[in-house]
Image (cartoon, helix red, strand yellow):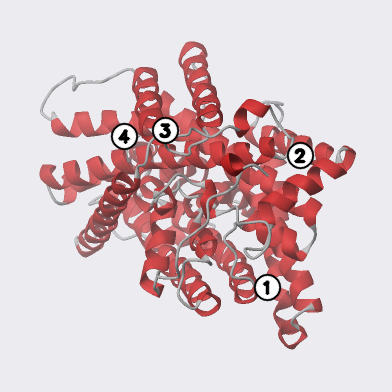
Amino acid sequence: MSTDSAPPRVGKRKLKLWGAVAISLGIVGPTLAMAGNGQGTVAVVGKSVPLVFVFGAIGIALIGHSFIRLTQRYSHAGSSYALVGLTIGKRAGFLAGFAVMMTYVFFAICTLGAVASFLNAFLAAADSGAAHPPHVPWVLVALIAVVVGLFFNTRDIQTVARALLAIEGLGIVCMTILTIVIISKGGAHSTGVDWSTFSLKGNSFSTIMGAVVAAFLSWAGFEGCAALGEETDDPKRNIPRALAWAVALTAVLFVMVMFAQTIGYGTNAAGLHTFATQGNSLTTLGKTYIGTWFSLVISFAAVISAFACHLASVATAGRLMWVFSRDGLGPKGWSRLDSRHSQPVNAIFTVAAVTAVLAILGGITKHPVVGTGDPALDFYFYYATIGAMVLMFAYFMMELGTIKHLLVERREKAGEVVFPIIGALLMLAVFYYNVKGQTQWTAAPFIAFMILGVGLLITLFLPGLADKVAAGLSSEPEEAGPVGKDLLAPGIEAHLPAGQD
């Protein structure tokens, strides 16, 4: 392998437990998740949004168990695809890697809609007294985000990434304060603190399970610190602990914030309609319950969070495309690195171009339509759902890998196999209830399955190529060199998308 295409080596083990927890929290992007993932959910399940997130938290806890058990065995600078490859086999690792790559392509696409929606919400909050607050066409905002993102993604952006992570921390603090204030003030005057939001009243179990994808989207990437096995002090102890803390903290945060938002707008028809049609659901609540200044702070944090997620998604997808093409899957041009910054600029430009084209098409055709009333937010939800379902397949394979690991390598823990089995069944249930009732081939679940079908065909009909790519994806650190965290632009591993691997 030539020097210019070999993955860079990672540094010394200096990351402590708290740092690993912070990385996972930053990767999830809580501000983006809570500001944008409730609207599409409330349009489907009404006031039962908190219940959807309870099911999501349970699912993520089960997936988290798999990551914890496997990272106790493998302190690897890789991701879910690496752990799948090390437990099930190279071809399964390739398929998981292909799923992760496509996940971040779709996250790079969808986050453009979030940036545009949140920016217009910020402008409206800044000029709240105007009858017609300023509004920038969402496609224009998306294209500007693409250009600015390219500028940063073709340079060393470690300092920028740290600043973005600090802003995300500010968003978490603001959301916590807002949640406490809303609950302490008794929620909306019309309906108050309505605990029936945690019940199935008015919804079927299948409806709730069909909406769980939005919850999984919020947690996507929680396992990010698992990619830092080579840089973490005592990784086989601290990485699993960091994963447990990240899951626990985000589970409490997301369920409580969604509960606060639901009762904050009100659980009657008018309140739920208002919730569903917000460009940034946190901004209006911030102004109503605390003040304009607070809404501006949390709205700005959401804009930056969404942009950071786009930035990181493009970087991650580009790096994965680089590895795939380096080993023979994809144009050779994607495998070239920029000599100055060691960035796969051709692959990054390709991802950015795809996101720009789809944004333009979305603006011209006025599709997709999800039902939020905001074209930018509809764009976000549609492509985010595709990405989340593809990522859930990678998580499903993680569950299968953990089942094998517990039964073969850790028989003393064999009783725990019930957890990955339940987790795998939960994934299958979510897939089923999302496909059930869909009639159009362009529905997000069908597009996700088509993408996975391409990866499966490559695995079945080009097994030698799949094995070669998988070897590059999931090599042990002491062997061919790590590819995992190193797929990310310097510093960007600290801020992957919304939720997001």
Q: CA distance from mark 2 to mark 1?
A: 27 Å
Residue 335 % position (x, y): 62, 34
Above or below: residue 250 compared with residue 393: below
Residue 425 appears in the rendering: no
Q: Are marks 1 and 4 in contact (CB under 8 Å)?
A: no
> Between disc 2 and disc 1, whose residue precedes?
1
Check disc 1 and report the residue beneath it.
Answer: 419
Q: Which residue is mark 3?
A: 154
Q: Is residue 174 above or below residue 135?
A: below
Q: Callout 1 environment at 10 Å: few (<14), some (14 to 19), or many (20+)?
A: some
Residue 30 in the image: state x and y as whole percent.
38, 53
Which element is circle 1 on? helix
Q: Is residue 94 left or right of residue 169?
A: right
Going from N to C along the chain, the mark reached first, 4 or 3, is 4
At mark 2, the secondary structure is helix
> As rendered, which of 437 and 10 lies closer to the eye?
10
Q: Amino acid at mark 2?
A: Gly
Task: Identify residue for label 2.
Answer: 455
Q: Amino acid at mark 4?
A: Phe
Circles 3 and 1, Cβ within 8 Å, touching? The answer is: no
Pointer 3 or 1: first along the chain? 3
